[in-house]
Amino acid sequence: THGRGIWIIDDITPLRALTPDLLKQDVAFVSARPVQQRIEGQGGWANGDAVFVGDNPPDSAVINYYQRERHLFGKMKLEVLDSSGRVVDELPASKRPGLNRVMWTMRAKPPRVPPAAQVAASAIRGPRLVPSVYTVRLTKAGKVYETKLTVGLDRRAKFNPADRKAQFDAAMRVVALFGDESALMDRIIGLRQALAQTGAAVSEGDPLHKQISDFDGKVDGVRKKIVATTEGGAITGEERLREHTDQLYGAILSYEGNPAAYQIAYIDTLRRELDDVTKQFDQLLAQDLPALNDSLKSKGQQPLSPPATKVGRNDATHASGGVAGASSALPADFRVSY
């Protein structure tokens, strides 16, 4: 035994807020302290179960609400809205009676990345939203309940809200770049699937079969400029546009202050590279595909339709092309200290 120990008590603010008047309500948000976006730490090691340490506070925002009775009928929805009233996240709402706790990561959704032979490790998470006063909205059986949630900077942060906004905007530009890469890859994959289906109906000895195969090779050459294609595990040394984008995305997310000038310039560089690859693919559609379609029609085969241009809209973005973060009208030193 250790003889003595220290009890670590969770935040009991919600318990103190459970007054007799509140317990009579059907649904009520329970007031909680403002949320501090803590600076994320790196590192660590395996301690096993012989080390007696306490858990750090959660990185997520804790949303507490009370229900007098269990929710049984109709949809129950919990949403987070930014200062402009736009929904930035939807959370799973517990239907249990009593005090309920929901964790909100305060992040936009991860980017959609094109499929490749390697994992895009940095793209598994979305950018953390900027400090602001958010609205939490619970919809239960047609009735709406709302409360405010203040999100501020870590009191130790050396950067200000303007720096955080610049970092968030840069990260969302990379998210949009990922989305456009994925949209182009969707076009390539769709065309290659159509080529494979058409080629399967043509005998290998037919010159048309070679023409289809040659065109498919050119299309696949464009794909290999976008993503790593060498199989053999996570470390093959192959880096293409997608892998460079992932490295840049991870670098921007690793520090939530103002991004470096070279990082902003690198976004523009990768965007130009993607534009060049897109032009190469469009040239294949404009120059090589019509000749292939003429050959297909001469053999009584159906011509191939060029894949439509897609907008690289990511799940984390809205119709305007970006997540609406916080209002820029924030205090100069918007921090949470407790």
Image: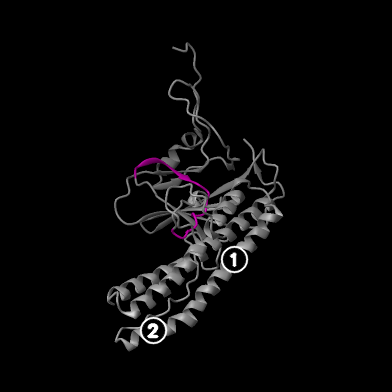
* Residue at screen point 47% across, 65% down: 223
Q: Is residue 79 above or below residue 57?
A: below
Magenta segment:
96-115
**Residue 131 in sight in this render:** no
What secondary structure is marked by label 2? helix
In which quadrant will I find the C terminus? top right
Q: Nearer the viewer, residue 328 or 194?
A: 194
Residue 57's x, y, as percent? 53, 35
Tell me if residue 224 comes above or below residue 80 in the rendering: below
Provide the residue designation for mark 2. 293
* Residue shown at the point (58%, 40%) measured from the top left: 40
Residue 176 x, y percent position in the rendering: 55, 62
Query: What residue lies at 49% left-to-right and 82% top-to-bottom?
Result: 287
Q: Magenta span: helix, strand or loop, mainly?
A: loop
The residue singled out by tag 1 in the image is: 273
> Disc 2 to disc 1, how far (Cα)?
29 Å
Residue 103 in the magenta stretch? The answer is yes
Judge depth for marks 2 and 1 and give the one in front: 2
Relative depth, front residue between 310 and 101: 310
The amino acid on which the numbered mark 2 sits, given as a three-letter code, is Asn
Residue 270's x, y, as percent? 60, 62
Question: Where, quadrant-wise, is the N terminus in this rendering?
Answer: top left
